[in-house]
Image (cartoon, rainbow, N blue to C red):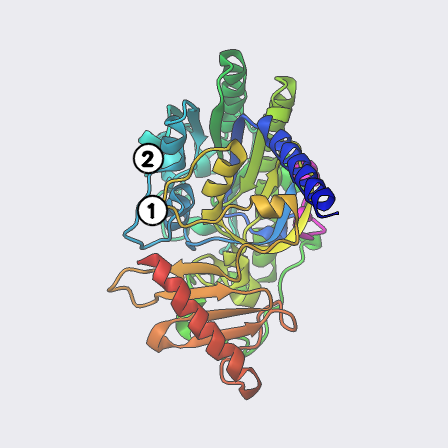
Amino acid sequence: MINFFYLLFISTWLTASIVHAQAYEKIKNILLVMSDDLKASALPAYGDQICKTPNLDRLAAQSMVFDRAYCQGLLCYPSRPSMMRSTYPGSKNKPITLGEHLQKFGMHTSRVGKIFHMGVPNSPRNGDSGLDVPECWTEFHNTKSTETYTPGLYRQINRGTVTKKMEGRQGIGTKERYWAAVEADISDGSDQADYLVAEKAVQLIKERKEAGKPFFMGVGFFRPHYPMVAPKKFFDMYPLEKMKVPPLIEGDLDDIPRAAYGIQNGELLNKTENGRRGMWQAYYASVTFMDEQLGKVLDELDRQGLTDSTAIVFTTDHGYHLGEHGFWQKGNLHEEVTRVPFMIRTPGLKPGRTNSLAELVDFYPTCLDLLGLSQPKEIVGKSLLPILEKPNTQVRDTALSLHNRKKHVKNKGCAIRATNWTYMNYGDQGEVFYDMVKDPGQYTNLIDNPDYAENVRKAREQLSQRLQQVQ
């Protein structure tokens, strides 16, 4: 009897191992697609009822969609290299980039558009590489576009300015560039960076098919990062009167420290309903334009017969505030900024959704696991492959986000997101604790509530433990 069950166990184990191996042996390539400043809550895949993203919707339907994925840096520069090196912002630990590691195994690595940090709108206007890491890529390609100075109806949304003139437009280095949008005259957007990124990506996919060599390709779109430029037809999809804006509640911020506000220079927007609606309109228009370009890339992958051998990862560098709590942009530790859209389409595995916590640093080791390659010992991320196989699997208890880790910066902070709560620490400037089950919109700071004293104590302890990984 013992021998029978032993043999049954061995047989079951071998069958599972063979099925596991067969599920991944087809994966030869990784396609990383990144948007810029894309908040998860603005997407239909994450519950938005207004935005139109048919291509992201179809990718989500084929992917494991992570409902609780979090960035490690709250701005473009710390977030992107953190993800591509699988290390935390501010850490002295700097592993080689994913692309460099993959090249050791004979993979071709290529980039078009923004994967590492590029200043916007300066890099797409100049056609330069910004703070890219060229060693990551076998080849890389930049695009050049007019950005704010695109012919069309220019809007300075915070001031209500509407004009077709080029004079006075906010551009590189100007103080109010964050609130600029253009309804571009060229209807297909062929003069825009994201259109050019998609066109080059299509060409690169064809070349990779012809070469027949495994590849890692990074396709980096610039929108919806300001300036929010898109053809007029995309703005027309979102009439101002149908835009829903977050409520402004008197006294909302009285219970959190000033350091928790992050980047705040949108005071004029908070004074006008049309201004806030205009920001949502322009943001949605930019997202839908980006989505159209994504569709071209996905279609070409299908056309070249590479879909079944290519794992696709879609994400962004961080989220974005569009008036929640009166906040605009990024640079704070609230959910709208730290939470990111993250979906992985894996040939051979079922699509689905997961509430398991994930960090962007987990991208690197997950790719290596999908390809069956070894991992550098220096990386800090955890492979998400167990979650891709079984969505209820937990690989993390918390997700860590960091801001301004430099010694002499005042508004430095860090946060951990657990399944049911978020804890933020701003040193001697204060702390914040939210019950994410009862208060998902993060309106009530419970840091001094005696009913949560034990939760706060454990959160402090867990954050201290997590910060040891940042050294």
The residue identified by callout 2 is 133
Q: Secondary structure at mark 1?
A: loop
Residue occupying the point 58% across, 32% down = 311
Q: Is residue 400 visible?
A: yes
> Given the image, on which type of amino acid does mark 1 rest?
Gly
> Given the image, on which type of amino acid does mark 2 rest?
Val
Mark 1 vs 2: CB contact within 8 A: no
Q: Nearer the viewer, mark 1 or mark 2?
A: 2
Q: Is residue 96 left or right of residue 361?
A: left
At label 2, counting other C-alpha atoms closer than 10 Å, the crowd grade (few under 14, some 14-19, many 20 or more) is some
Question: Which percent across, then down, holds residue 49?
Answer: 72, 51
| Disc assigned to residue 3 | none
Q: Which residues are magenta?
A: 44-62
Is 11 covered by the magenta stretch? Answer: no
Q: Does 83 sit above or below residue 74?
A: above
The residue identified by callout 1 is 173
Tell which circle, 1 or 2, labels the residue nearer the N-terminal end.
2
Q: Does 109 sit above or below residue 230?
A: above
Q: Give the camera-side residue of 259 and 14.
A: 14
Question: Which percent across, then down, holds residue 248?
Answer: 59, 70
